[in-house]
Image: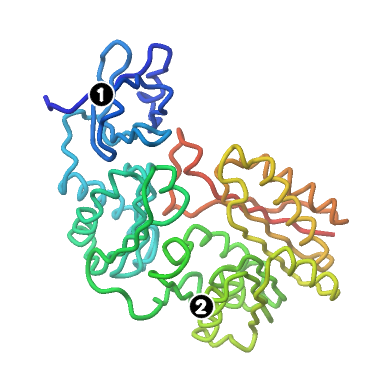
Amino acid sequence: MNDLPVIRLRPKSKPQAIRHGFPWVFADEAVLDRRTKALPAGGFAVLEDAERRPLALVTVNPASKIIGRVMDLDIDAQIDGAWLRAKLSRALEMRERLYDQPFYRLVHAEADGLPGLIVDRFGDAAVIQPNAAWSDTMAQDIADALSEVAGIKTVIANGQGRARGLEGLSERMDVLRGDAPAAPVQVQMNGAIYLADMMGGQKTGLFYDQRPNHAFAQRLSKGATVLDVFSHVGGFGLAALAAGATHATAVDGSAPALKLAQGGAEAMGAADRFETMQSDAFKALETLAEQGRQFDVVVCDPPAFAPSKSALDAGLRAYERVAKLAAPLVAPGGYLALCSCSHAADLTAFRNSSARGIGRGGRRSVLIHTGQAGPDHPTLPQLAETGYLKSLFFRLD
């Protein structure tokens, strides 16, 4: 038996959730005595039910609303290099079955048994997001394990974003292994070429989650004019060009992101069919409508408008507004794709807001396809947050 500290569920908490695969223990479910509150963030403990029966080995963070995250059902497990290598090997085996080239999300947090850890792979380089205290503390161990298991030569820790703030972690940007890339990395997906800035880009530098939705949009884009709003580094727009779109317009508020998008178009030999528009997305939609512009395919892939339950109502109104402004820009018989990466907005709520917005935009629609993140972003059935991405494709009258 190990000599780890113990945290215990309150009598009215339900240990069945943990036994059935739910990976989190919320602070209001645990006994928070002085000893528990003094446990180090990122340390490990044995989780027991109210009857003192062991449930799991958890990582603890008294500063977080999620005080415990399940690491292993074996309470005698040792969370060390060997444990990390075993978890990473299992994650890698699935990705290598799914993808011919080493460009994918290698670790998707709880769904890969590594709570609060994101790893995106770019060939022989990787960007990790250590969004839980344990992964922040063990970032160097994770980098070493990535090298041993997957042959990763460069590992960058991008410790920025809302998730770290909720864990009480400060921002960080460190090169844990190898040398920082001197230039953006070229990534090929669905025949398009994207430029990923692993040091200065948003999150890990590229969004792999939309890969299957880019592919579906390509089926609509041959010979079409395409508007890609909230484009980031060219997401849907470059995919459309790779599929034979006659022209794509990328709209984003970030000049550096649009520069990378332009670089991707040039690398593809498609710069003559590509234009960028730096603008607030809502303003751009209004301006294009004033100009009487219409496109065969319009895609809106905004940031998370509803990142928490408290922001849900405002977020759904924002999604509705996007749909309302985008709908008039779709040519008759054309297609509108609307996306949400908000954890708090489930598919039904997002679909209803989108349909309502399209109607308020004066258009009638039918839903032809519903997409989600690719299989390198597995969903843990017990944790809805792991299935965050929704993509709706409508045909408009």
Q: Badge 2, how many Cα within 10 Å: few under 14, some, many 20+? A: many
Measured Cα–Cα span from mark 1 to mark 2 = 50 Å
| Contact, mark 1 vs mark 2 (Cβ under 8 Å) | no
Closest to the observer: 206 or 63?
A: 63
Count of marks, rendered view: 2
- Find the residue positioned furthest to the right: 362
Tell me if residue 111 can be seen: no
x 57%, y 60%: residue: 213
Q: Please, what secondary structure does the residue beneath circle 1 have?
A: helix
The quarter of the rendered structure image containing the N terminus is top left
Q: Is label 1 or label 2 in front?
A: 1
Q: Where is residue 208 in the image (x, y as percent from the top left)?
A: 47, 61
Residue type at mark 1 is Arg
Query: Taking 265 as reference, is 161 left or right?
Result: left
Q: Dot 1 corresponds to which residue?
A: 35
Residue type at mark 2 is Leu
Query: Taking 311 as reference, is 94 left or right?
Result: left
Disc number placed over residue 260 in the picture, else none = 2
Mark 1 or mark 2, which has the lower sequence index? 1
Disc number placed over residue 298 in the picture, else none = none
Q: Where is residue 359 in the image (x, y as percent from the top left)?
A: 84, 51
Q: In which quarter of the image is residue 14?
A: top left
x 54%, y 88%: residue: 269
